[in-house]
């Protein structure tokens, strides 16, 4: 138990240091992406949205805007259709490369998120969690996580949550490192990326279990 507490404290320090260094090194890229977004489509550069963090505490997640303004009140709402017209030209590229997630480094710096952990759900999704699924709120949400490297947008929320619960039960700094390395590989190969996020996927909270779980450690 003592060893795990030390590892958790190391993770907090690593998150802060890596986020700060990343923001400094990537600042030119932030400027370029911001200018391109502005030139491509009118509106704000940064998209903010309320999400559920550790213990269900709400916070605002930051992303580079990839859709037209007020997109959540159009079309499928929180869902995304194939070739969704709400996604801008630049936004489609940012989503595919996951560059739209870079502003979450500020969330990590503020202590609201970690580099690795369950992806933060929308408040209305959390309200539909079962008692077991609520356990995914025991840790800080992450920019990436086990569910992302195992399927990302190709698997329903019920299965993502099962992966997240497994991650919580088997967490270690070594597991975090492996997930981060796999994240880089998946981004390069565009593995798990899909524009189609229909309501039956993002609103599916029936429990299911990932197969061959031992291979994740």
Image (tube, rainbow, N blue to C red):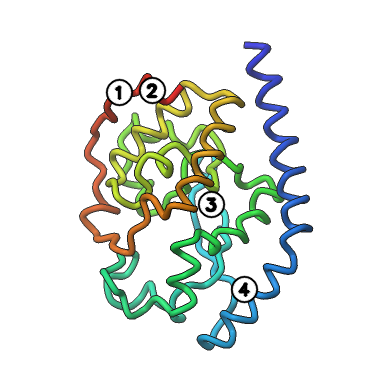
**Label 2 environment density (alpha carbons within 10 Å; few <14, some 14–19, many ≥20):** few
> Which of marks 1 and 3 precedes in the sequence?
3
Q: CA distance from mark 4 to mark 2?
A: 37 Å
In the rendering, which numbered label is found on residue 212?
1
> Which of marks 3 and 4 precedes in the sequence?
4
Quadrant of the rendered image containing residue 92: bottom left
Between circles 3 and 1, the one closer to the viewer is: 1
SS at mark 4 in the image? helix
**Label 4 environment density (alpha carbons within 10 Å; few <14, some 14–19, many ≥20):** some
Residue that carries the numbered disc 2 in the rendered image: 215
Residue placed farthest to the front in the image?
Answer: 189
SS at mark 1 in the image? loop
SS at mark 2 in the image? helix
Where is residue 122? Give x, y as percent: 42, 54
Q: Residue at x 26, y 43 (%)?
A: 205
Compared with residue 175, is residue 32 higher up or lower down, i.e. above or below? below
> Which of marks 4 and 1 precedes in the sequence?
4
**Label 3 environment density (alpha carbons within 10 Å; few <14, some 14–19, many ≥20):** some
Compared with residue 41, is residue 24 higher up or lower down, i.e. above or below? above
Compared with residue 80, is residue 4 higher up or lower down, i.e. above or below? above
């Amino acid at each position: 138990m003592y060893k795990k507490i030390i590892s958790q404290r190391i993770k907090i320090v690593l998150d802060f240091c890596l986020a700060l260094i990343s923001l400094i090194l990537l600042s030119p890229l932030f400027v370029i992406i911001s200018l391109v977004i502005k030139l491509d489509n009118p509106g704000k550069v940064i998209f903010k949205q309320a999400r559920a963090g550790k213990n269900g505490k709400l916070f605002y997640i930051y992303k580079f805007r990839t859709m037209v303004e007020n997109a959540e009140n159009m079309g499928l709402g929180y869902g995304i259709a194939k070739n969704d017209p709400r996604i801008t030209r630049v936004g489609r590229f940012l989503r595919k490369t996951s560059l739209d997630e870079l502003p979450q480094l500020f969330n990590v710096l503020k202590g609201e998120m970690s580099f690795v952990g369950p992806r933060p759900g929308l408040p209305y999704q959390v309200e539909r969690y079962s008692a077991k699924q609520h356990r995914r709120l025991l840790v800080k949400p992450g920019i990436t996580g086990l569910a992302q490297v195992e399927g990302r947008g190709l698997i329903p929320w019920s299965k993502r949550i099962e992966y997240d619960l497994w991650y919580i039960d088997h967490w270690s700094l070594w597991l975090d490192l492996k997930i981060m390395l796999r994240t880089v590989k998946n981004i390069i190969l565009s593995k798990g990326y899909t524009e189609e996020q229909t309501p039956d996927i993002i609103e599916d909270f029936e429990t299911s279990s990932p197969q061959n779980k031992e291979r994740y450690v």
